[in-house]
Amino acid sequence: MPNKNGKWIEPFLGTGVVAFNMGFKNALLNDTNPHIIKLYQEIQDGAITPQIIKCYLEKEGETLKSSADNGYSHYKLIRSRFNNSPNSLDFIFLSRAGFNGIMRFNKKGEWNIPFCKKPNRFAQAYITKITNQAANVSNVIKPGWEFTNRQFSAIIPLANKGDIIYCDPPYYGRHSDFYNGWAEEDEYLLFNQLKETEADFILSTWHHNDYRKNEMISKYWDRFNIITRNHFYHSGGKIENRRSVVEALVCNFNIDERVAKHT
Ligand SMILES: C[S@@+](CC[C@H](N)C(=O)[O-])C[C@H]1O[C@@H](n2cnc3c(N)ncnc32)[C@H](O)[C@@H]1O
């Protein structure tokens, strides 16, 4: 993104992978999932360091290895500890020990992913990888970055001219969970807020797949610039489930022109 003088505003942060790779000095990063936000706030203020994460994962990984039911009994213990009193280290553990690294919460907001039965989820090489990721992120996050835990609708009005709002909301018509529901009212509200903003915005969504179109595109988004990109999407482990999906970036400015101007 050529203009990095404004603020990078990301109302649907998720893992944070986009913001962490943008190189902005100022950022406002938000998600309705409080566990994601708390983890990054604690990395930012030093309450959690790569060293703490390493020691914690080594200790819990060892206990998991020797616990009953091939580790399942220890997984259940950490899951109930987290559900009774959420903390960022158990959150990292669960996303590592849960099936396929998926994150999902039930109607009560509790962790709701089955145990990943693969051995060696906490092998030293993986722990080193996670520790290094935490170290990288702690270097990337600037002191002035703000992490918030609000609805997207409270964030978009905070943007000013010169800022960039990057939205990667849940997909309409796809699965949802406690922190991650998405209905047409949400899409409509997002559209109304983005069409009013003085900031630049980018929205990332799916455009169509082999079977259907994303009807939200023609209803709301195709008055803006749209860049599409083809890719494959695996649903489940089987190769037959490989589908072609076209993703869309919707912007209120022309990315090609903007990039050309700066290169
Ligand atoms: C598609 S994910 C974002 C993925 C992210 N771009 C990444 O690369 O990891 C959507 C995120 O929006 C959050 N979310 C869902 N509904 C929201 C809402 N109403 N306001 C703010 N965040 C919301 C979810 O918790 C989820 O983390």
Image: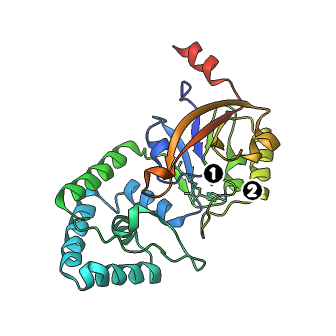
How packed mark 1 is, by other alpha carbons closer than 10 Å (few <14, some 14-19, many 20 or more), is many
Q: Name which residue lies at 20% across and 78% down.
A: 63
**Residue 23: percent from left, percent from top:** 45, 34
Q: Is residue 263 left or right of residue 46?
A: right
Q: Is residue 192 left or right of residue 165?
A: right
Is 156 located above or below residue 59 in the figure? Answer: above
Label 1 beta carbon less than 8 Å to ligand 1 = yes
Neighbor class of circle 2 (other Cα within 10 Å; few <14, some 14-19, many 20+) is some
Res. 87 in view? yes
Colour scheme of the picture: rainbow
| Image spot of residue 33 (x, y percent) | 55, 64
**Residue that numbered label 1 is attached to:** 169
Residue 70 at x, y percent in the picture? 24, 79
Q: Name the quadrant of the N terminus.
A: top right
Under circle 1, the secondary element is loop
Q: Residue at x 34, y 44 (%)?
A: 139
Disc on res. 7? none
At 59% from the left and 43% from the top, the residue drawn is: 9
Name of the residue lying farthest toward the front:
240
Mark 2, ligand 1, within 8 Å: the answer is yes
Q: Is residue 179 left or right of residue 237?
A: right
State whether residue 216 is above or below residue 226: below
Give 221 or 119, whichever is nearer the viewer: 119
Q: Going from the N terminus, do you reach mark 2 or mark 1 first?
A: 1
Say which amino acid is labelled 1. Pro
Residue picked out by circle 2: 186
Residue 125 versus residue 257 in the image, above or below: below
Give the spatial CA distance, label 2 vs label 1. Answer: 9 Å
- Say what amino acid the circle numbered 2 marks: Asp
Q: Tell me if label 2 and label 1 are in contact, CB under 8 Å.
A: yes
